[in-house]
Amino acid sequence: MMRVLLTGMSGTGKSSVIRALAALGYKAIDTDDGWCEPLPDGRQRWREDAIAALMVTEDAGVLFIAGCEENQVRFHAQFDHIILLSVPAGTMMQRLASRTSNPYGKSPAELSRVLEDTATIEPGLRQAADHEISTTMPVDDVVTAILRLVGA
């Protein structure tokens, strides 16, 4: 089974892309949906036991996992492809302000954290990624680009 990590900062479209992949019939997991545990500082991390079990599952040709947590680096070597989804900061802020599927990023403190994380964390994600896709294009075009990159 091919394993693909879709990572990026909040507001880059990870959840939208993973839903579109699932709608096409791919095994597609958004780690925000029950695969994380909260941390005292308000952040979250992957539930490593659950992610480890997911990574050894062989029930699909391709497994897409979307998420961006500090401890995901422990699993990077197990992915066949790591794709960074990115977007300009202004677009990210507009998306966070208008999204209805996830409240994160709406408060001034959370928005500030997202912008700070973009400056400090995104460069490391970019370095770890095999590919980067700007999500300023329509979701269907992003999905097409991902499928082309991974040969699915």
Image: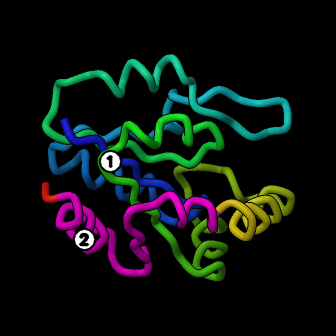
Find residue 61 and report its image quarter: top left
Q: Which residues are magenta?
A: 122-150
Q: Residue at x 79, y 65 (%)?
A: 116
Nearest to the observer: residue 119 or residue 17: 119
Question: Which marked residue is nearer to the observer: mark 1 or mark 2?
Answer: 1
Horizontal and vertical percent position of residue 151: 14, 59
Horizontal and vertical percent position of residue 147: 20, 61
The residue indicated by pointer 1 is 4
Secondary structure at badge 2 equals helix
Name the chief secondary structure element in magenta: helix
Horizontal and vertical percent position of residue 50: 47, 20
The residue indicated by pointer 2 is 145
Q: Is residue 148 magenta?
A: yes
Q: Residues within 10 Å of mark 1 (few under 14, many from 20)?
A: many
Nearest to the observer: residue 43 or residue 148: 148
Q: In the displayed structure, would residue 91 be above or below residue 49? A: below
Q: Residue at x 53, y 39 (%)?
A: 32
Secondary structure at badge 1 equals strand
Left or right of 88: which side holds 7? Answer: left
3D distance between C-alphas at marks 1 and 2: 13 Å
Instruction: Return the disc, 1 or 2, that comes first in the chain's sequence.
Output: 1
Q: Residue at x 62, y 75 (%)?
A: 94
Q: Amino acid at mark 2?
A: Ala
Find residue 134 and report its image quarter: bottom left
Horizontal and vertical percent position of residue 44: 68, 36
Q: Is residue 123 magenta?
A: yes
Q: Quadrant of the N terminus?
A: top left
Q: Amino acid at mark 1?
A: Val
